[in-house]
Every structure is written in structure tokens, then in C-alpha cells.
């Protein structure tokens, strides 16, 4: 295939294949692509096969095109008879040009290798289709990419080729799923309780999830999955989509009475944000789509897609200590020096100073925006601490909240016009905060220079980038026009510029914990803070469902103190550490108050994490579908299937005692594995061990997956690690 291969205008059926996925698209000269299939690879199909498939999928004609839609395009329009949300909705002054109908469409099949990652990596194939409506004076382009991982990305672009302004209300591409996808799964939540899954039938109508706070939010849907009723992690065909964007967004599951089921998504544009002058265009965010037999297979494609990025974190992810739950706003140099010493003794590799280091910041009511080291607390600047941290062999990180501002700050007093506000003023505060308008060039330049200067002066390796107030009443001064879209694009530029100026700088998307977890922000960051709640009991589910989208190396997971900051729950150290190690490990605990025994135990967990982090941060994440709701089992299996680490956790009392068998998914069925409890933490299940609990047991992978092993006895909020290592096959001599 050439880099750009035009497709004939006559009706044609195209077959794209990559990574175990087939995409079959019908294209012609008057219609944007119509997807007939995306999912399992269908193998080699001849032109006759493809034409026959298109015929086989043509529904009966009832009484009109409106009630008998043979195909639905990536960007369905009312002019084609589609009765749902139009893919492109907009108009010119007076309500003109609101219905789009194409006179001609050109299709191009392209290899994505020569282009940049943002436009498709090496090995991806792209179908780019350009439609023209000369009456409405609009040009619409759709792009569908199929990646080597088998993941699909879709987006659309509209250009105003007329002589007056055109306003885009929304641009919502989508993909169809088959009739067997009868159940929906997405997520909801709140601060400290993010990404809680919810299910419902995929009934006729539309299930709409919207985020209006200038970020996906703590209640974000994150993904919209449709699958066979009852689908789990290991069973049931499932298809799902994610909107790779960090601003206002919508994701929709739409089931028409003509039988079509679509998964769609895009940006929510506020009034005026989508106005296109002549010659201007607007591009929707990428709609990222994956499928699989079970949610694990769905995730594997997304994880492999992310791990193929050139900017994806490589090498060991440094174990860090964050000071927030250790000292809060009490920045005492002697205390922090002692804390850093304990951290280094435990094998911690990165020390992150959290909120409270800058001017006027003795509590959360003042100072945001004044990004100068507070001379009253740090008379010599941060140098004494930073130099000590570096001398101990750790790198240094610092907390910022660059998009936020307190009205009680020098910056707000000097530049009130930099604060987002409408005709009604800056709106209601949240945590005493308002939002700094990065769409103001001067505000953007100020933040960039202050952050860059501090990164340079203190040799900062890591920024914890917080974001605690939603973008409500987000209007530019002086006219109050909406600014969420511009702000989001400026945020991306700001992060990119900081990384360009300071190669190797890492950024964490915090956002009050898990409020901005999406594949748009992850293009510019190196991990997300899963949640402000580090209670290990809650984190078992928080990390599990965040991991549906992101692999472990991108998930910030911390060991907290015995009594949790958020829930006041008291938890055993082995459970806290064994939960936190399943990601990018950190510690958030005043180690100066920890007992020597606890510090020794934590050091053992950190050492073990370092031993296995290459496995945890490169292998396939798997989950067992257990019938016992009190137990959770997940694992990471090496790509070559030679090694696997599983974690069995009890979150409640089991109704039966002992609890029965657990299966170990993801192993090579043809290899033999030795399975044993893995220290540290093996003692949690040592009081009454199962038959294999002493020296372990060796069994074929297919047996461990199909039959399993007896689960050890675990008290609530305890866990045990299980290691499965491939062993040479035993040759039985002939008798």
C-alpha cells in the first residue's frame, strides 16, 4: 500500500486488519464511511466476500429510508434519514446551513508511519474521508485509524469554506456495535470514590454521560462499554469507547428503533466556542475504541497502544514519597530533613514536597497564583531541603496548582482580569479557589515563566499538577465569553512547553485526585493520581477500574499511615503496601512517627516492588471473575508468559469458610508453572495454609486457569501475593 491510496468513488467495501482486529467499511462518493464491522479479525476476504458481506448485512426495506437505514456513517446526519443526534450540528446566522448533505466524498487509505505519533504511529493504517457540501459551504473530514494493538481511533474535522461565520454546536463521531451488545457499563463516582462501575440494559433510546466542569470530573464515565449481557473480565464479547480529551465532554450510547446501536463521543462546546470564521476549522477529540472477549482483552489493546508511544515512561518508575499526609501545611525544615532521611533509608527514590511552600500559603485559603518560595518559611529558599534530598540520592518533586488562583493572593489583586468570570463575577468558590484563565496570553506567560524558573533553580524532576475547582462560570475578561476550550488547549501547550524546556521532567495529573483521568491529559503527563483516597480497602476497586483505561505504571498508588486520612479506617501495613505496589508506588505517611518494625516491613515491600516492577509495568493485567463478592483476584502476566504475579485480597468476610477455589487467568496453557505464596505478605495466609501452602504446587497453565487452586484463608482487609513461574517440562521416561 502506498502512503496515500485513493479509493474509487463507486461503492466499495474496504477491509482493514491490524492486531487481531478487522474493520470493514463501506465507502462511496456521496457518503462518509459506514462501518459494517469492527472487532475480531475475519481473516483474508476477497472482494467478492466483502461485497457479499455488505449484501448480507443490508436490512429489509420497510417503507422509507428513514425507517430502513441500510447504513449509518461515522458522522450520521439527518439528511441521510438518521433520526438520532446528528454527527455535525451547527448553523450560520439566522439558522442557515444547519443540515449537511454531501455532494462528493473522497476517500484515502494511508499508512501512518511517516507521520508523527499524534497523527498515528508506525504500523497504523488510516482511512481519511473528505466530504464537501457546497450548498452549506462546509467541508467535513473523518479519520479512522487502526493501530498495531488492534485499537481504533476516530475523529472528525469541519472547515468553513463559506464567506460568513459558521458555529459548530457539536461534532460527535461514533461506531456501531452489533445487536448482541445488550448491556452497557460505564462509571460514576465522587471525590475519593471515583470510577465506580454501573451497568444497565442497552435499551432503545440514548444513555448520555456529560462532563461540564472543564474536566472529565470525579463522576466521569471514563469509558462506555457495550457487550453481551453479563460480560466480565474474562468472558463475554465487549466493545467500548473513550473520549481522549480533558475539557467538557459527552459520551453517548444510542440505540435507534431502526436497530442501530452506536457508541459516540466528543467535546461539549459552550456558546461561541465553536464559531468558525471563513477558512477556519474545528477538530473533535479522538474517540478511542477497543473491543475484546472480556474486559481484560479490551484493556490489553488500550495498554499496548499507550505503551507503544515514544513518550511513554521507560525504565524503572521511581518509588516516591509525597509529603502531604505527612506534614500538610506545616513546612518545618528540620522535620522534612528527617523525613527525607527515613525515606532514603527505605529505598525511596523521589521526594515530593506538596502544598504549602509558596507565599501566603499557611492554609488553603490564600496564596494560589503566588508561585514564589515563601521567604517567611524558607529564608534560604528550598535549597537546604533540595540539596539534602539530592545528597541522599533521591530526585526532587514539587506540587503546583497552576490553573487555580485564590482571590486572596497578590496575583489576583494585581490581575483580577486573569480570573475566569462572567457578567456575574467569578462565580462560587470551591476550596476557596477560582480558576486562572490560561487563555489570557499574559497569564499563560506568567505561569510558564514562574514554573520554568523554579524547575530550573531547584532541578525539579517531577511536578504534581493539581486542579481542584471545576471550570464553572469560566468566562474570559472583559466580555465574559466562554473559555473552557481555549483553556484546555492552553493547558496542553503549557505542559508540552515545560517538557520541551526541561527534558526528562515528569508530570502527574492530580486534579483533586482522580478528576482528570483521560487519554488527552496522558499525552502530556507521566502518571495520574488515581484518587485522594489512599485507603487500601477503597483503592482495591479504584485501581482495578482505573486500570481499565491505564496500565499500572501510569497509576499513582501510595502507602498511607495506619489510620487513613479520608476514611479513618485502620488497616494492616501488609494490606496497605500490597495494594499500593500494584501501580507506580509511593508513600504518603509521616515516617518519623512510624515504628522501627513498620519501617523495616515497608522497606521489604519497597525492595520487592523494585524486584518485580519491570513485570508489573510491562505485562498484561488480568482479573479473575470470582463468584465470591468478598474476594478480588488480579494479576500481571509477563508478555512471554514465563512469569506472573497475582494478588488475592479479601475485602469482607466470606460466606463460606474456606472460600473455595480461585483460578489464575492469563497463563500459557502449554507451560507448567510453580505456584507459591510470595513474600512479603505471605504470612497473611499462613495460619491455616491450604495443601499447597508449604512449598507450593506445579501444574499446567490450562489447569490453573480452568480448575485453579484452593484459596488460602484470609481475614477481611488482608491479602496474599501468589507467584507463578514457568518451569521446564518434566519428561516422564517410557515404561
Image (cartoon, grey):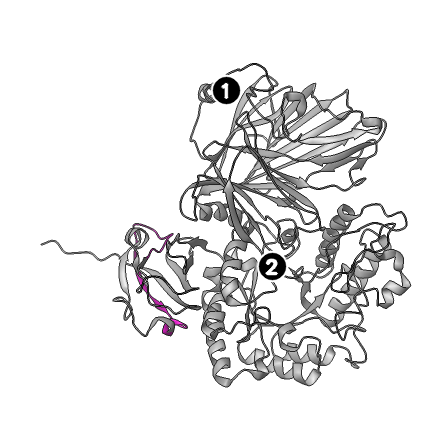
Q: Looking at the image, which is closer to me, 558 or 585?
A: 558
Disc 2 crowd rating (10 Å Cα; few below 14, some 14-19, many 20+) is: many
Q: Secondary structure at mark 1?
A: loop
661 is within the stretch colored magenta: no
Q: Judge by depth and name the residue closer to the eye, 717 or 109.
A: 717
Label 2 sits on a secondary structure element that is strand
The magenta segment is 662-683
For the point 72% across and 31% down, which residue is it?
Answer: 89
Residue count near mark 1 (Cα–Cα under 10 Å), binned few <14, some 14–19, many ≥20: few
**C-alpha span from label 1 to label 2:** 45 Å
Residue 129 location in percent, x, y? 64, 28
Residue extending farthest to the left is 735
Whole-percent x, y for residue 449 in the image:
81, 62
Which residue matches tag 2?
Answer: 527
Direction from residue 492 to residue 566 in the image, left or right? left
Q: Nearer the viewer, mark 1 or mark 2?
A: 1
Q: For residue 119, say whether it is visible.
A: no
Above or below — where is 62 with respect to 568?
above
Badge number at residue 58: 1
Horizontal and vertical percent for residue 295?
46, 47
Q: Nearer the viewer, residue 190 or 3?
A: 190
The part of the image, by quadrant, that contains residue 257 is: top right
Residue 505 locus on image (x, y percent): 67, 62
**At 65% across and 53% down in the image, what residue appears?**
217
User: In screen coordinates, is 226 left or right of 337?
Assistant: left
Amino acid at each position: 500500500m502506498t502512503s496515500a491510496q485513493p479509493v474509487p468513488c463507486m461503492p466499495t467495501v474496504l477491509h482493514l486488519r491490524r492486531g487481531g482486529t478487522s474493520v470493514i467499511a463501506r465507502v462511496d462518493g456521496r457518503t462518509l464511511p459506514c462501518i459494517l464491522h469492527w472487532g475480531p479479525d475475519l481473516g483474508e476476504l476477497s472482494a467478492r466476500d466483502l461485497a457479499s458481506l455488505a449484501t448480507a448485512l443490508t436490512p429489509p426495506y420497510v417503507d422509507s429510508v428513514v425507517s430502513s437505514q441500510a447504513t449509518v456513517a461515522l458522522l450520521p446526519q439527518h439528511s441521510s434519514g438518521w433520526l438520532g443526534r446528528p454527527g455535525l450540528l451547527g448553523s450560520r446566522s439566522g439558522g442557515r446551513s444547519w443540515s449537511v448533505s454531501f455532494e462528493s466524498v473522497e476517500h484515502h487509505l494511508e499508512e501512518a508511519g511517516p507521520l508523527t505519533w499524534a497523527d498515528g504511529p508506525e504500523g497504523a493504517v488510516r482511512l481519511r474521508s473528505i466530504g464537501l457540501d457546497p450548498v452549506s459551504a462546509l467541508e467535513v473530514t473523518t479519520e479512522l485509524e487502526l493501530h498495531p494493538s488492534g485499537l481504533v481511533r476516530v475523529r472528525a474535522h469541519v472547515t468553513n469554506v463559506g464567506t460568513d461565520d459558521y458555529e459548530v454546536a457539536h461534532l460527535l463521531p461514533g461506531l456501531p456495535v452489533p445487536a448482541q451488545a445488550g448491556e452497557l457499563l460505564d462509571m460514576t463516582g465522587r471525590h475519593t470514590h471515583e470510577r465506580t462501575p454501573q451497568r444497565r440494559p442497552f435499551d432503545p433510546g440514548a444513555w448520555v454521560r456529560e462532563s461540564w466542569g472543564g474536566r472529565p470530573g470525579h463522576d466521569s464515565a471514563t469509558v462506555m462499554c457495550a457487550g453481551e449481557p453479563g460480560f466480565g473480565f474474562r468472558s463475554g464479547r465487549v466493545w467500548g469507547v473513550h473520549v481522549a480529551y480533558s475539557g467538557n465532554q459527552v459520551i453517548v450510547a444510542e440505540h435507534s428503533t431502526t436497530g442501530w446501536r452506536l457508541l459516540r463521543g466528543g467535546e461539549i462546546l459552550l456558546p461561541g466556542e465553536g464559531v468558525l470564521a471563513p477558512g477556519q476549522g474545528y477538530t473533535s477529540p479522538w474517540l478511542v475504541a477497543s473491543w475484546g472477549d472480556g474486559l481484560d482483552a479490551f484493556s490489553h489493546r488500550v495498554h499496548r497502544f499507550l505503551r507503544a508511544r515514544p513518550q511513554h515512561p521507560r525504565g524503572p518508575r521511581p518509588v516516591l514519597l509525597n509529603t502531604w499526609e505527612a506534614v500538610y501545611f506545616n513546612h518545618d525544615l528540620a522535620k522534612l530533613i528527617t523525613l527525607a532521611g527515613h525515606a532514603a533509608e527505605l529505598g525511596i527514590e523521589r521526594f515530593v514536597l506538596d502544598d504549602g511552600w509558596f507565599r501566603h500559603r499557611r492554609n488553603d485559603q490564600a496564596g494560589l497564583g503566588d508561585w514564589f518560595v515563601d521567604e517567611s518559611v524558607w529564608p534560604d529558599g528550598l535549597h537546604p531541603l533540595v540539596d539534602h534530598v539530592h545528597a541522599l540520592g533521591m530526585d526532587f518533586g514539587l506540587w503546583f496548582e497552576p490553573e487555580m488562583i485564590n482571590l486572596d493572593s497578590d496575583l489576583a489583586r494585581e490581575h483580577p482580569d486573569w480570573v475566569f468570570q462572567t457578567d456575574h463575577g467569578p462565580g462560587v468558590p470551591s476550596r476557596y479557589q477560582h480558576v486562572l484563565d490560561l487563555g489570557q496570553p499574559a497569564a499563560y506567560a506568567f505561569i510558564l515563566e514562574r514554573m520554568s524558573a523554579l524547575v530550573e533553580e531547584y532541578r525539579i524532576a517531577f511536578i504534581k499538577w493539581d486542579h481542584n475547582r471545576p471550570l464553572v462560570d469560566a468566562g474570559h475578561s472583559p466580555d465574559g465569553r466562554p473559555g473552557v476550550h481555549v483553556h484546555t488547549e492552553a493547558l496542553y501547550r503549557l505542559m508540552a512547553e515545560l517538557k520541551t524546556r526541561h527534558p526528562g521532567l515528569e508530570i502527574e495529573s492530580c486534579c483533586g485526585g482522580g478528576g482528570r483521568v483521560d487519554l488527552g491529559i496522558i499525552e502530556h503527563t507521566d502518571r495520574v493520581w488515581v484518587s485522594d483516597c489512599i485507603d487500601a480497602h477503597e483503592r482495591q476497586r479504584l485501581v482495578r477500574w482505573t486500570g481499565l483505561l491505564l496500565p499500572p505504571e501510569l497509576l499513582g498508588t501510595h502507602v498511607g499511615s495506619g489510620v487513613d486520612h479520608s476514611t479513618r479506617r485502620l488497616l494492616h501495613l501488609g494490606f496497605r503496601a500490597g495494594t499500593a505496589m500494584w501501580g507506580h508506588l509511593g508513600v504518603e505517611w509521616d515516617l518519623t512517627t512510624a515504628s522501627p518494625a513498620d519501617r523495616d516491613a515497608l522497606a521489604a515491600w519497597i525492595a520487592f516492588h523494585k524486584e518485580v516492577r519491570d513485570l508489573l509495568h510491562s505485562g498484561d493485567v488480568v482479573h479473575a471473575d470470582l463468584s465470591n463478592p468478598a474476594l478480588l483476584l488480579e494479576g500481571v502476566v509477563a508478555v512471554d508468559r514465563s512469569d506472573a504475579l497475582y494478588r488475592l485480597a479479601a475485602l469482607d468476610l466470606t460466606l463460606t469458610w474456606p472460600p473455595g477455589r480461585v483460578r489464575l487467568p492469563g497463563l500459557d496453557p502449554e507451560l507448567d508453572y510453580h505456584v507459591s505464596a510470595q513474600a512479603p505478605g505471605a504470612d497473611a495466609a499462613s495460619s491455616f495454609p491450604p495443601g499447597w501452602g508449604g512449598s507450593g504446587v506445579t501444574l499446567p497453565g490450562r489447569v490453573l486457569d480452568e480448575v485453579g487452586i484452593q484459596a488460602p484463608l484470609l481475614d477481611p482487609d488482608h491479602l496474599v501475593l501468589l507467584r507463578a513461574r514457568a518451569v521446564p517440562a518434566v519428561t516422564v521416561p517410557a515404561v
